[in-house]
Image: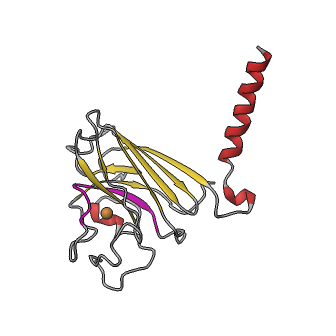
Amino acid sequence: MRVAVQAASLALVGAVAASVPAAAQGADDFYRASHKGTFAPVKGGHVPRAVTYDERLVPKGARIKVVDEGATRISLRVAGVARGHHFGAHVHTKPCGAKPDDSGPHYQNVRDPHQPSTDPKYANPRNEVWLDFASGLLGHGESSAVQRWKFRTGQARSLVLHEHGTETGPGHAGQAGDRVACFSVPFGEPRR
Ligand SMILES: [Cu+2]
């Protein structure tokens, strides 16, 4: 019994240590910020943190979890979305708003001087964060991306779900149809 209690308290200590923001440790490169949301439509002018613009693909009540780990790994999980559907997903520059386009363009490590950016030299999954996924028969989906760079603080503010998978050809690279949902996430910032 005592052993079990000790194991439990050790596990608790581990969990607490893991949740200490990197800033407190003086090492900005290493942190793990977990963000969870439940989708809802814009209502009466109120924009929820996780907003759906298309309840056919992302119904009210669908859930999202985004984990942002410093220097840099991003992972995405969703539940309750349309089944057997291929979604595009990217990190965008601005927070979600009442209108789908409010989240701005894709975050790019090296910014394309020509915006909107459809040049595969810039609009690619190494220079942007692409998290496309196909949902399963239960409406779950997940994906992750590892980057060789760090976010510029304050310039990557949302995770946008799109109507279809992301295109890669010249003139269309990075496009993925309509923005069907959006989750505001302050990427690159250890949560305080
Ligand atoms: Cu996008």
Residue at position x 65%, y 46% in the image: 19
Q: How many marks?
A: 0
Q: Nearer the viewer, residue 104 or 169?
A: 169
Residue 43 visible in the snapshot: no
Give residue 163's quadrant in the image: bottom left
Look at the image and say whether residue 166 sits in the magenta stretch: yes
Residue 87: horizontal and vertical position, in percent? 27, 52
Look at the image and say whether residue 89 sits in the magenta stretch: no
Q: Is residue 185 left or right of residue 102?
A: right
Q: Is residue 85 left or right of residue 67?
A: left
Residue at position x 19%, y 43% in the image: 56
Q: Classify 92 as above or below 59.
A: below
Q: Classify 116 as above or below 126.
A: below
Ligand 1 in which quarter: bottom left
Residue at position x 70%, y 41% in the image: 16
Q: Is residue 22 left or right of residue 100?
A: right
Residue at position x 30%, y 80% in the image: 115
Residue 159: horizontal and vertical position, in percent? 39, 57
> In which quadrant will I find the C terminus?
bottom right
Residue 48: horizontal and vertical position, in percent? 38, 49
Q: Residue furthest right?
A: 2
Q: Nearer the viewer, residue 42 or 148?
A: 148
Residue 164 visible in the snapshot: yes
Give residue 99's quadrant in the image: bottom left
Residue 24: horizontal and vertical position, in percent? 73, 57
* Residues rendered magenta in the picture: 156-167
